[in-house]
Image (cartoon, rainbow, N blue to C red):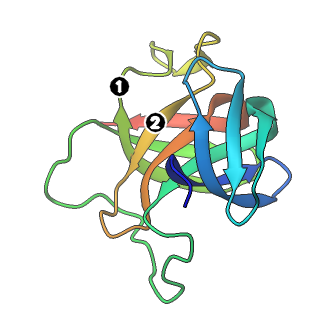
Amino acid sequence: MSTGDKVVIRFNHGKLLKGYLKKFSQDSRTILFEEAGVDSIQEISVQELKAILFVRTFEGDKKYRERKRYEHRQRKGRKMFVKFKDGESMIGYLEGDMPWEKGFFISKPDEKKAGFFLMPADEGSNNIKVFVIGASVKDITAIP
């Protein structure tokens, strides 16, 4: 059995891999990843990725429909709406500091970090948290 966080990594071109994160840092430009069922570790450039999904199970629940709204009870963190370059969107709560420069508009990602953590708004989601790769984001909005 592998050790490490159970993740699904989504590539910019649509491919996904399920496995275990062996080495990861918000500041790193690469990750070490072991695909489930494969006995080798590969180094993957973060620039190839759209997001790293930290999951409860690899299978998920195909019948479950994730709620795309904020619940009444407040979770820790700032409400965020993220739109990816491929048209997909995600809502959740920002974990940590604002990943973009603040101002009237949120723009210019912090180039020192590869991305930021987003906690899903739906607590029933198979995703525990998502590491969003900054280069894959088209637009990000903080919701008051």
How packed mark 2 is, by other alpha carbons closer than 10 Å (few <14, some 14-19, many 20 or more), is many
Task: Answer whether labels 1 and 2 touch (C-beta < 8 Å).
Answer: yes
The disc labelled 1 sits on which kind of residue?
A: Gly
The disc labelled 2 sits on which kind of residue?
A: Phe
Mark carried by residue 117:
2
Q: Position of residue 66 (x, y in %)?
A: 43, 72
* Res. 84 in view: no
Per the model, the C-alpha gap separating discs 1 and 2 is 7 Å
Task: Label 2: state its secondary structure.
Answer: strand
Q: Residue at x 78, y 35 (%)?
A: 43
Q: Residue furthest right?
A: 13
Disc with the residue nearer the chain's start (1 vs 2): 1
Q: Residue at x 54, y 35 (%)?
A: 140
User: Quadrant of the image for the N terminus?
Assistant: bottom right
Seen in the picture, residue 78 relative to 81 is either above or below; the reply is above
Judging depth in this view, the residue of 33 and 76 nearest the camera is: 33
